Image (cartoon, rainbow, N blue to C red):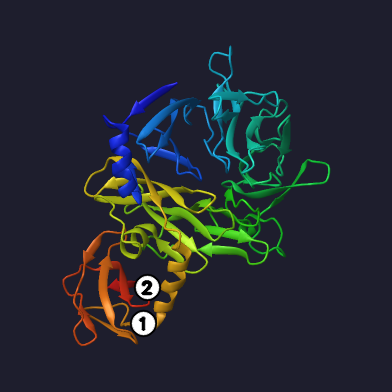
Amino acid sequence: MKIKFLFASALFALSINQVSAQYLKNQDYINSMGVSNTGKISIYNSYAESIFLWNPDANITTDIGAISPGNGYGGLVMFSDDSNYTSGTSIVDGSGNIAEMSKYNMQTQQWQTLGRLGGTSGVSAGSGYDISGDGNTIVGISYDPVSKKAVGTVWNGTSLINLGTLNPNRQSRALSVSKDGSVVVGGQDTASPFRGIVWRKNSSGTYDGSMLLIDPNLGNADSNTLGEARVVSGDGKWIGGGGATNTTDAYLWNSVDGAIILKNTLVQAANSKGYVTGINYDGSIAVGFFMYFQNLGEMPQYVPFIWTKQGGLKNLNTVVKDELKFDLKGDIIQGANDISANGKYITATSHVSGRSSFHTSRIQLPENFLAIQQQEVKANEIKLYPNPVKDYLNIDSKDKIETIKIYNTVGQLISQPKITNNKVSLSNLSSGVYHVNVTTKNGTKSYKIIKK
């Protein structure tokens, strides 16, 4: 067990971090996966190397011995609700380099490999992607011994269950599980990219699978199926995912509302894809990101989002900086990777403005976050026009306007203009898409405008 102190004195670092716990960052590690109800985060740097547990409040990282995805390995380290167990992927003792889906016990600091269906693919006999909130169920993939294909797999505490595939000779994968293990979601390989699938536990203890449909009356045609399901809420009622070819936007799904498509209104890009990557226990908060290409052939760009029932879809940078007034220490948040089941913590990938290096960050939401979002909606008695706008933007509000802030599509504050005679000048802005945040005594409302 290796422990790395990020600062010379852990006690000194703890006292500093308690003051600034709203936003903390770890510049030594690039990739984050899961975040626990106590704010701990699973992190790693490189493919097929060690995974660490980061305690942001104490500024300590601990090597927990699992293997990170890449070079033939897969899986994610995610947390049970009490933070005593994680899912993951670890090397089978005596196998050399063969890995299986696994469970980690925080108390004993030991990994338990959970077996395999019988097949292997290179160095992998399986991968663990999520653990139920009660810690009793692990989901992921293992390899069918006959077809040699990866299939969604559930470990129920004693044995492995093969979830099978809804498309013969094609793969499936289980990526997330509800708190009690009764609902599992993931992806089904089809003739096009992976589509969303949900498995529900039946009375015999096995699972019945079905595709996630946009319109339940139109059948399983690719044009009517949602993209791969990446997460399910702890109560099993909300499912999130994205990235399909027919609807490249992120989505949320529940049995009452059906598919809620989260269209990319945060950045103007014809070739973007969106993904929901985390949902809290009751589905009241979801996080994710949109990925797009500014120009073909260039590196992808990312815009993180947060969604609430009260406030809808918003740029996470805008919410954290402008609504919550957190100090991001010069960072721009690139992608939200997970939210804890209790809705208190978000883990994200960030970078310092003007630099290309990335690092892991943690955002601690205030206890009244959803109430803030509800209050923010009250600030909707505001009209902005014309849109598109050339030089002057008219802003009509029944309440006195306290501040106006203008952000670009990656969340950078561009301007904080003064309002004169219910107008602000935008003549100094280049043509493009911007987000205007208008704050009154009732809260803040964000609007998208197009500058000619």
* CA neighbours of label 2 inside 10 A, class few (<14), some (14 to 19), many (20+): many
Position of residue 341 measured from the top left corner of the image (x, y, whole percent): 54, 50
Q: Tag 1: residue type? A: Ile
Position of residue 2 measured from the top left corner of the image (x, y, whole percent): 41, 22
Q: Are marks 1 and 2 in contact (CB under 8 Å)?
A: yes
Q: Secondary structure at mark 2?
A: strand
Q: Nearer the viewer, residue 19 or 217?
A: 19
Q: Quadrant of residue 410?
A: bottom left
Position of residue 371 measured from the top left corner of the image (x, y, whole percent): 47, 68
Q: Tag 2: residue type? A: Lys
* CA neighbours of label 1 inside 10 A, class few (<14), some (14 to 19), many (20+): some
For the residues marked 1 and 2, what is the alpha-carbon distance in whole angstroms? 8 Å
**Quarter of the image where the C terminus is located:** bottom left
Residue on which the image places disc 2: 445
Residue on which the image places disc 1: 382
Q: Which sits earlier in the primary sequence, circle 1 or circle 2?
A: 1
**Quarter of the image where the N terminus is located:** top left
Q: State whether residue 72 is above or below residue 206.
A: above
